[in-house]
Amino acid sequence: MPNQLHIPFKHTPPAHIHDAVGAYIEFHHPDAHPDAFKWDIARWTDLRRDGVGGYVHVDRLDASLLYHAHLVLLSTKFPANIGLTITYEPAFPSAARRACSAEDLVFERACVLFNLAALYSQLGTAASRSSAEDIKLHAAGVIQYLSNQVIPALASSLGQSVAIPSELTEPALKSLELLMLAQAQECFWQRASMGEKDTVTFLIPTHTRSESYKDGTLSKLAKQTSIYYENALSAATSVSPSAFPQEWINHLSVKKHHFEGVAQFRQSRSDLHTHKYGIELGRLKLAQKEVKLGLERASKGVAKAVIDDIKSLSKTLDSNFIRAQKDNDLIYHQTIPPESTLPPIAGADMVQGIVNNKLQNPALMIGDSENALFSGLVAYGVRVAVELYIDRRDNWIKEEVEGRAKELDAETTKLLQKLNLPGALDVLDKPAGIPPSLLRRSEEIRSMGGAEYLQQQIDEVQTLGASASGILEEAFDLLDTEAAEDETFFAQLPEGMAQTATDAGYSNSHVANKELTAKANNYRQILDNAASSDAVVRSKWEEWEENVEVLSSEPDQMERLIPSHSTSASSAEATQAHTYARAIRAGLEHLEDLRSARARCVESARQRANTDDIKPRIMREAAGLARWVEVKPAMFEEAIEEEMGKFDRYRDSVEEGREKQEQELERVEHLTELLIQARTNDPVLKQREAALQSLDLAYHRYLEVLSNVTEGAKFYAQFSDHLSVFQEECSRWVDLRRAQRKELLDFIAQQSRPRPQPNKSKPKGKSRARSDDGLQQLANEPEPTPATDTLVKPQPQVSPAPQVESDVQAQAGPSSTELLPSRPDAIPPPLSAFKLPAPGSSEWEDFELPSPPAPPVPTPRKPTRTKTTGTATPGRKTRSKGAAE
């Protein structure tokens, strides 16, 4: 039967059943040994070899059904995942489909059923049309059983860990089921069309049976066949990508159109017999349209027999259409109705999936013999029920017995801590002595050096602070010295030269050192803040120094310095306090007895749980169930609840002590209030408690001050390094300013010298001579002159000091910029003075000199310099001016 499709097998390699099952039994069944089940494991291996499919023979049907029955039985003994890896190749291999592996017995069962359906399908394809129908229906029944009974359990068992193979998805299985039904319907139609009237006569009323109804009946059979193929095609293409190859899709499409054409053709013959010539032509046209669509899909991959069948139908339709049209045009002249108005053809469904009884009831394959696998192994459901009971029992004891006992213990502890019991009674029982905690702290203070060591650290911090301030003062001195030199420089410049110096890029000192001054004032503020913090630390130390000295003394000496309440032991207040204390101690002993009783109750419940075993009872109830019934823990819920009732008495015992404890706690709290009131009236006790609290607080103050001075010493050490860098920076800046002033004086002196004249003009007046003398005097002042080729070098950028601590960073000044910028391009004339010929050169005869400047107006007063940005910085005022700005 080459014109019908068959379902291919899902091939599988051998599985390592022996290793997986043996490991599972050894781990999960400590009361059993894997060697006791050697026969069962070997039998499982043989059943799988014969039952997974892959061979087309009728004997393989029983082998597959037998293996499936044992898989159902094994599901009552094992969980789905026992560590056995099952691998199956795809039924429709392609580059995008790969083998699927899962550690799941439900997956094995689903694949076995799929191969069983494939075996039925292939047997039906190889059989004749007269017997293939039932085989196809058995294939459809297996797929229906697989979809309804196994696939939901498989989806739940695999979860998100492994994807279900595409051929086992619901749309793919539905398409395969419909395909088998379509092919079975096709077999039925073919037998009917070949004249086997006994197969169709029940569709025809007895009193009207005749050959005229044959075409109408065949039309209905063909219509239902087309419907099955159409539904199979729709299910196959409902998911993208499809689980089936394109050849299958084309085959289904061709078959659908083929049988739709057959249905219309057969119905047209029926219409011909009833003289409906117009409707006959309409159906023939519709049949031709369907056949044409089928031929368009008859591409590569469609069997030649299928193509030949539809081509044969096409020729038959063409000849009948020509005849019918000729008769209608010449004789009948009936109107051809549109396609949409043609009466629809109702399909006659003659097939239904058959589910084998041995598939629905696996016990029919195995029977009640002793050959069932792993009959001596405890069912998985029994083991889960026992584990469920143990888990529920242990949790119940933990919550209802241990949890309530811990809750009562916590209530007692909370109240006693609130009342400071029994510690508050130790003061009365021990008339003298020092608390152990205070002794430990005293030893710790002495090991750290005591008060003497801390005083040394405070002095060292003060010394470091003074050193840092001295470094900063030296930097201020450098800036003040440079400001004084700058003021003298401007005061001695000739008239008009101050503006020349300013234009050349040389600014007044209070402008040039603005960023250095701001940085210095910022550092001063940091040191002032640090000094304030040091003062707070010293004040704190002076406040607690005496208490620290007592705390760091020897235990005997410290005990003599602490007031003792033994002197008031015979007072009325002390006597009353001791009475209350004895009553409180009795109450504490009663509370301890209640706590011990609860502890014994909890321990008894634990011991009872350790000896408890519900397994025999669960086993007895499970033995009463049928062998093929899947044992589930819910079946033993009643037995579990009855067994849990054995532990109710332990919870009741704990609850009995709750009321007694609440009464005793109220009594202890009341007695403690009376004790506190009695102690409040004892002045010596107040003094002792105050002294102990003061010494305890002195310990914390000692650690606090020690931490402060340690941080202070570290701060001053690091900050002094940054101040030294800043001092060096100021020193370099002062040297550079001096060099710039020297260059300016040299330049001004060159500008002021008399230029040689070709006509030997007379020298100017006395004022020019006096100016030359003044410049010569300034030029002769001892100042460092760096080697340079420019008139005034640009100021180097003042590098900011590295960041020190977070507090220094927070108060750091603005980033330094260029203090003396490069000489602007607007002052080229002074540089031209260096282009004059040498004094003895012959070039002077032809050299044209510019007109000499007008002589300065003599004045008896000291010439004033032009001020561009403000008055000169007076000596020793750098800090105040910088702070003001």
Image: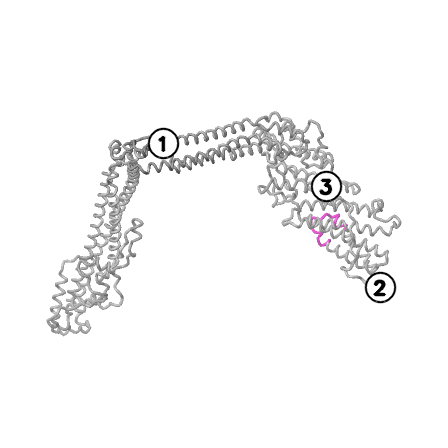
Which residue carries the number 2 mark?
333
Whole-percent x, y for residue 846 in the image: 18, 72
What's the residue at 78%, 43% (across, down)? Answer: 129
Q: Quadrant of the C terminus?
A: bottom left
What's the residue at 14%, 62% (across, down)? Answer: 779
CA separation, marks 2 and 3?
51 Å
Whole-percent x, y for residue 332 in the image: 86, 62
Q: Nearer the viewer, mark 2 or mark 1?
A: 1
Our reading of the magenta stretch's main secondary structure is: helix
Q: How crowded is the residue under tag 2: few (<14 C-alpha within 10 Å), some, or many (20+)?
A: few
Stretch of the chain drawn in magenta: 294-310
Q: Which of pointers 2 and 1 lies earlier in the amino acid sequence?
A: 2
Which residue carries the number 3 mark?
141
Whole-percent x, y for residue 105 in the image: 63, 36
Which residue carries the number 1 mark?
579
Element type at mark 2 = loop
Q: Which of pointers 3 and 1 lies earlier in the amino acid sequence?
A: 3
Above or below — where is 5 with respect to 264?
A: above
Q: Is residue 304 magenta?
A: yes
